[in-house]
């Protein structure tokens, strides 16, 4: 049994055999096979060779009549594939080491290539390129076969891969695919999107997880905790099967509170909004009982087309969401990517510290054409409903004023062409840097609402990258420093009588709800699948007891103490969630 | 009755050495014969009919190779390979222009 921690991007539990999809673009990890699978794996090698030969002969014939180097190259590659001693070296490796055909092909060919690369003669050393070419051709055959298999599944599996591409996921037989786990990727990765849209659990950022699997491995994907368990022992398996059953039962139970209001036992109404990434997620946000969108991330527009999105691309994406939430708040956050993530930001040079670099609002303020395109689309959409605009990563009043000035410029442009928009559109900012939190009173005077982005606020305040396993345990919302910052931001927002919501992960974490309510938060924006559970908590507590709890937390001096206290309190309120 | 054995030493003279295409020609030529053919580069010996092994010999320009053939057509095999390496030089450029004395050889 092996437990791997990753990033949860789509909730739920899946337990099934792992189907590993390697990529020829990444190093093929060493993966074992059972002795009984030797014959089949050797057969796969032979088949890959034979298919590669047919493919090469066809390519060679296409060059017929021409005397050229390309033809020679194909001819050489065919000789390699016909070379018995070469093929034997691979099949013997499979049999002796009990590894997959993919790993054997990749290892042996790389051995040969590095032999060439090490020879001090440019003509010979360049030959490594030919070897890599043969490697790719063989892997294409082997991986193509796996793809076929995924398209014609007959039993339930979970897909484990380095990263999945749209072409791969499009071919999956979705009746049998029960979950995803990938080595690469983040919340906005293709895997995350597909999983969420299919309602399947997914965990990403699992480093080299594919190397821990055999073709017989059973895998548990826990999309709630961001954990993947490989070959669980009997006890763990049983625990998870019970947990999965419990969750299903709990979900059914929760669906009955969908139409009930999110009101505390002492009558205080709490606004529960959805965080969404894609327009079609608005449907789920509504189904789960969200009364609006508190965070509409727009990064997908910049990441998926490969080119800068046009105004119409933005507009259509915003209009689609507004159709689901007529008259309800929809907070559109402007582009929040780092320059390092933008595929077409060519002039951008490598940054040594992108998290503290040119990103988000900073990038927008330096690329006004792009920024204005998005603002124009948001303004045009503002007549469709209660559309609001939110600027991320604001670090000081100057930046907020600059962003607002550009918004006014765009309004003037629209006036000139008599394009309708809502001139009183609400303008808000994310509070996610310590500098913004500490100057919240100043910022509050110049905007209509705050949304506290706890993820970045914690990262910047505690100076911890939670993606770094060596320090990840230091990352916690239950830190006295975070408590003090939140308390002062909430105080400043209430004093200035502006809107306030929390849209970071804590807003969807059952353990933190009582604390947030006790600190004065009345609007939460969270991942749609968590809305029913959070509503259940809201409906089970009184503001009075939440206030009491928050005061108590204010006297605590460590993460551990706060964490345990919050957990105990939440468990008493809604034991099913833990 | 023991089979005929022929042996010869040749020098690689084309600039690019025994890279992919020459290796292919060498292997193709060797494969026309039934004899077992081994190629020696110092301590290393490889099967003349395996392109993988031949290319891994990494014989650069100036390398001296020993070729040994065992079998009924061993003599013809050795002669064909010598011709390919030293006379035709794999249809490629020799290392030193004008040094034709070697090319004319003993045909």
Image: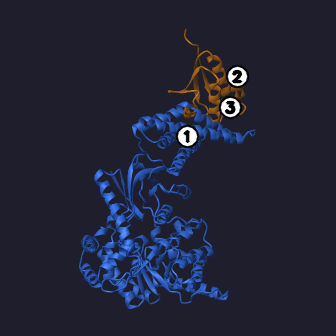
Chain colours: A blue, B orange
Q: In the displayed structure, would residue B4 be above or below residue B85?
A: above
| Mark 1 lies on residue | A48
In primary-sequence order, the first of circles 2 and 3 is 3
Q: Tell me which residue sits at (47%, 83%) in the image.
A: A428
Q: Chain of mark 3?
A: B
Would you say A57 lies left or right of A393 here?
Answer: right
Numbered disc 1: secondary structure: helix
Which secondary structure lies at badge 3? helix
- Residue A460 shows in the view: no
Q: Chain of mark 2?
A: B
Pick the front one: A137 or A150? A150
Q: Are the residues under badges 3 and 1 in a single subunit?
A: no
Q: Nearer the viewer, residue A510 or A76?
A: A510
Question: At which x and y percent is residue A108?
Answer: 49, 39
- 2 vs 3, front mark: 3
| Depth order, front residue of A251/A203 | A251
Q: Residue furthest top?
A: B1
Residue B29 picture location, percent across and down: 65, 26
Labels 2, 1: one chain = no
Residue B15 screen position, x and y as percent? 65, 36
What mark, if any, has residue B105 been given in the picture?
Answer: 2
Q: Is residue A165 above or below residue A57?
A: below
Q: Would you call the spot at circle 2 few (<14 residues within 10 Å), some (14-19), or many (20 or more)?
A: few
Distance from Cα at disc 2 to Cα at disc 3: 16 Å
Q: Measure the C-alpha gap from mark 2 to mark 1.
A: 45 Å
Tell whether A161 sits left or right of A495: right
Residue drawn 37% across and 91% down? Answer: A495
Q: Which residue is denoted by mark 3 in the rendering?
A: B90
Q: Nearer the viewer, mark 2 or mark 1?
A: 1
Task: Determine whether, in the image, residue A62 is placed left or right of residue A328.
Answer: right
């Amino acid at each position: 049994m092996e437990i791997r921690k990753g990033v949860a991007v789509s909730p739920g539990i899946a337990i099934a055999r792992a189907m590993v999809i390697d990529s020829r673009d990444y190093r093929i990890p060493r993966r074992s096979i059972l002795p009984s699978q030797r014959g089949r794996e050797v057969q796969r090698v032979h088949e890959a060779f034979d298919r590669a030969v047919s493919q090469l002969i066809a390519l060679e014939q296409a060059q017929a009549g021409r005397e050229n180097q390309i033809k020679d190259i194909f001819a050489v590659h065919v000789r390699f594939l016909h070379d018995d001693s070469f093929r034997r070296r691979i099949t013997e490796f499979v049999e002796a080491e009990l590894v997959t055909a993919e790993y054997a092909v990749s290892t042996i060919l790389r051995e040969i290539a590095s032999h060439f690369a090490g020879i001090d003669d440019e003509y010979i050393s360049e030959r490594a390129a030919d070897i890599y070419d043969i490697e790719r051709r063989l892997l294409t055959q082997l991986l193509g076969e796996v793809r076929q298999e995924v398209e014609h599944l007959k039993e339930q599996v979970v897909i484990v891969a380095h990263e999945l591409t749209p072409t791969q996921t499009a071919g999956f037989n979705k009746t049998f695919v029960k979950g995803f786990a990938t080595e690469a990727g983040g919340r906005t990765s293709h895997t995350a999107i597909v999983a969420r849209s299919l309602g399947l659990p997914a965990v990403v950022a699992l480093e080299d997880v594919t190397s821990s699997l055999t073709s017989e491995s059973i895998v548990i994907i826990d999309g709630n905790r961001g954990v993947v368990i490989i070959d669980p022992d009997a006890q763990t398996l049983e625990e998870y099967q019970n947990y999965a059953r419990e969750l299903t039962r709990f979900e059914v139970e929760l669906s009955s509170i969908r139409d009930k209001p999110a009101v505390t036992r002492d009558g205080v109404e709490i606004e529960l909004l959805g965080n969404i990434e894609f327009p079609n997620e608005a449907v789920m946000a509504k189904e789960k009982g969200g009364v609006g969108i508190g965070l509409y991330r727009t990064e997908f527009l910049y990441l998926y087309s490969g080119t800068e999105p046009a105004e119409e691309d933005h507009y259509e994406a915003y209009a689609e969401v507004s159709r689901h939430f007529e008259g309800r708040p929809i907070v559109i956050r402007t582009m929040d990517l780092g320059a390092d993530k933008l595929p077409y930001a060519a002039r951008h040079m490598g940054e040594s510290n992108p998290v503290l670099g040119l990103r988000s609002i900073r990038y927008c303020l330096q690329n006004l054409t792009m920024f204005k395109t998005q603002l124009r689309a948001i303004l045009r959409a503002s007549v469709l409903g209660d559309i609001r605009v939110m600027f991320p990563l604001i670090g000081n009043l100057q930046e907020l004023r600059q962003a607002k000035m550009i918004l006014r410029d765009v309004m003037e442009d629209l006036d000139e062409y008599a394009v309708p928009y809502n001139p009183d559109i609400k303008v808000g900012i994310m509070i996610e840097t310590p500098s913004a939190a500490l100057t919240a009173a100043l910022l509050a005077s110049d905007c209509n609402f705050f949304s506290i982005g706890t993820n970045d606020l914690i990262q910047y305040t505690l100076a911890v990258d939670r993606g770094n396993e060596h320090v990840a345990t230091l990352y916690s919302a239950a830190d006295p420093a975070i408590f003090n910052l939140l308390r002062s931001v909430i105080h400043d927002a209430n004093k200035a009588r502006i809107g306030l919501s929390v849209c970071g992960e804590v807003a969807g974490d059952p353990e933190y709800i009582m604390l947030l309510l006790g600190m004065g938060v009345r609007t939460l924006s969270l991942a749609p699948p968590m809305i029913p559970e959070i509503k259940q908590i809201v409906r089970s507590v009184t503001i009075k007891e939440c206030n009491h709890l928050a005061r108590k937390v204010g006297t605590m001096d460590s993460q551990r103490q706060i964490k345990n206290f919050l957990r105990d309190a939440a468990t008493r309120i809604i034991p099913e969630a833990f | 009755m023991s089979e005929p054995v022929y042996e010869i030493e040749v020098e690689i003279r084309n600039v690019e050495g025994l890279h992919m295409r020459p290796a292919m020609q060498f292997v193709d030529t060797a494969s026309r014969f039934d004899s077992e053919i081994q190629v020696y580069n110092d301590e290393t010996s490889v099967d003349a009919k395996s392109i993988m092994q031949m290319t891994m010999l990494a014989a650069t320009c100036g390398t001296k190779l020993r070729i040994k053939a065992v079998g009924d057509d061993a003599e013809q095999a050795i002669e064909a390979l010598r011709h390919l390496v030293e006379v035709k030089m794999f249809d490629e450029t020799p290392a030193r222009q004008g040094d034709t004395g070697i090319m004319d050889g003993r045909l």
